[in-house]
Amino acid sequence: MARATKMLAAIGAVALATGVAGCAASGDSDSGDGQVTLKWTTYSQERLSFYEEAAAEFHKEFPNITVVPETLVEGDYYQALPLSFRSRNAPDIFVYTSPSAGEYFELADVLNNEWAQPLDKSVLPDDFASRFPGTSDLAEPTYARDGEIYTVPRPPSTGALGYGYMFFNKDVLAAAGIGDDIPETWDEFVEACEAVEKTGAKCLSVPTQGPEEIGRLLTVFMGVNMKGYRPLGPSIENGDYSQILDPDYVEALEFLRSLFADGHVIPGSYDKVAGRQALATGDAAFYFDGGWMPSVFSESFQFENFGAALPPGKDGVGPENYKGLIGQGPPMPETFISAQSEHPKEATQFLEWMTRPDGWYAEEFSKNGFDALPWIDPDQVADLVPTSNPAHELFELSPQVHVLAPQASLKCPDLAQSKAATNVENIRPQWVNGAIVDYLLNGGDWESIASPIVDEQNAVLNSTLEAEAEAGLDVSAECFAEPEWDGLTPFEN
């Protein structure tokens, strides 16, 4: 918390330095000389120089508006953001991606917290909502409320440039005699590990410092080795918290444990920065994460000689061998205008400029290979990313690893008012991931470890849902279940 407080102080210092942020009413944006400064805060530190370039480009068209981007370490950001609202020093534009009720309930959270105000329609084109394919024109209640638009959505976290890949150090594989023969099955992965370790390197880097870190590996590996994997969520088969006892889940987790037990993983408890650095320095051959890694490796570690591949399946790679694909849904809410901002019109002008499908931001963001923006055609993104950018090859891999999956929040919108997921998480925050980290590092019998967790989580889930249904909400365990879905075919939400 001390570090977050320092970060909050830094946010305040920026506001003081800019001098005019929050000093004028939004209607006229009048700060004496007609100039307005907006504070835009996020946590993608590796993109700060790009954000600064974007702010300068925006200023050319809107010379009366200065946007000051700032980025924090992700963990610090989520501690500092609530503090900034409590101290009435919130940024004008902020991102929010961790709602307590689960994915697609970002808007419900920020409105309940009284953190957001709607975009100013007076400066939006009539067709603004249609810029975002897959959102049903920014439909309520996910992106809008009572006819007002509140958010600019982000790309799905598992889209073409999202979670889903196994990255490797080409130099390490060459030294091990593996070259381009990237392992596709579990057995082949173990063989590759043994070859790598003869060179003195370790096979795999896995961040485990903080239970949330293990999600990077689990989202990728479990996503293709079981049907309908949901990170920390209810089972797609049963609609309850029995996923971690699914036979395919247990088998895949036991395989991962064997990698730790046999010394194929860099030992110790370290964060994602150290985990990524291990691949960049050649201390590890493989690392699992998302499609943002090409820019992270090149920008943060000045590391270029890496490749990306599909995650290994028990019987091989690709839909014909995988038991499921990594599920994704429509673009999720992300960027909001602060309820404390006195310049919503100017903030809206910036968000409108940012989300022009053929604008500077869309083109340059895509050229950098950061992600597939939800306001630009995916085929256009693939064309814009230079072939020299390692992110380019991910567009070819993505259809083999990603699929549109059922989203409980879209099936049952009343879940936005449900406390079921929150109550389950509050039994013990990150309970499942914490237990997984302990199991991977120290061993044990997973089913014996998991069974008490499942029992207690389901007791809370069922009691909460039953009480809420009696109170009039249309919620039940069936909201989370889609047992007929095969995990491989795109699902119509």
Image: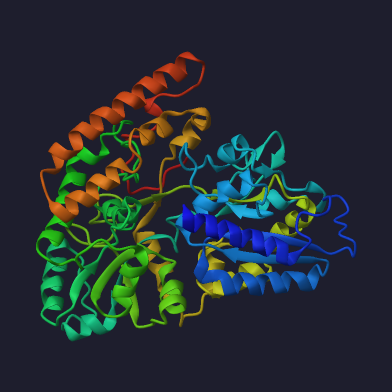
The x, y position of residue 283, in whole percent, is 24, 77
The residue located at (35%, 51%) in the rendering is 212
- Against 108, is 258 above or below? below
The x, y position of residue 295, in whole percent, is 46, 73
Q: Is residue 418 left or right of residue 223?
A: right
The residue located at (24%, 34%) in the rendering is 453
Q: Is residue 322 visible?
A: yes
Depth check: give the residue in front, 364 or 116: 116
Number of numbered discs present?
A: 0
- Against 465, is 272 above or below? below
Q: Is residue 398 left or right of residue 6?
A: left
Q: Quadrant of residue 137?
A: top right
The residue located at (32%, 35%) in the rendering is 484
- Against 67, is 405 above or below? above
Q: How is the image coloured?
A: rainbow
Depth check: give the residue in front, 106 or 161: 106
The x, y position of residue 5, in whole percent, is 53, 55
Q: Quadrant of residue 258?
A: bottom left
Q: Quadrant of residue 39?
A: bottom right
The x, y position of residue 20, in whole percent, is 79, 61
Q: Is residue 271 left or right of residue 190?
A: right
Q: Is residue 374 visible?
A: no
Q: Residue furthest top?
A: 470
The residue located at (10%, 73%) in the rendering is 194
Depth check: give the residue in front, 133 or 215: 215
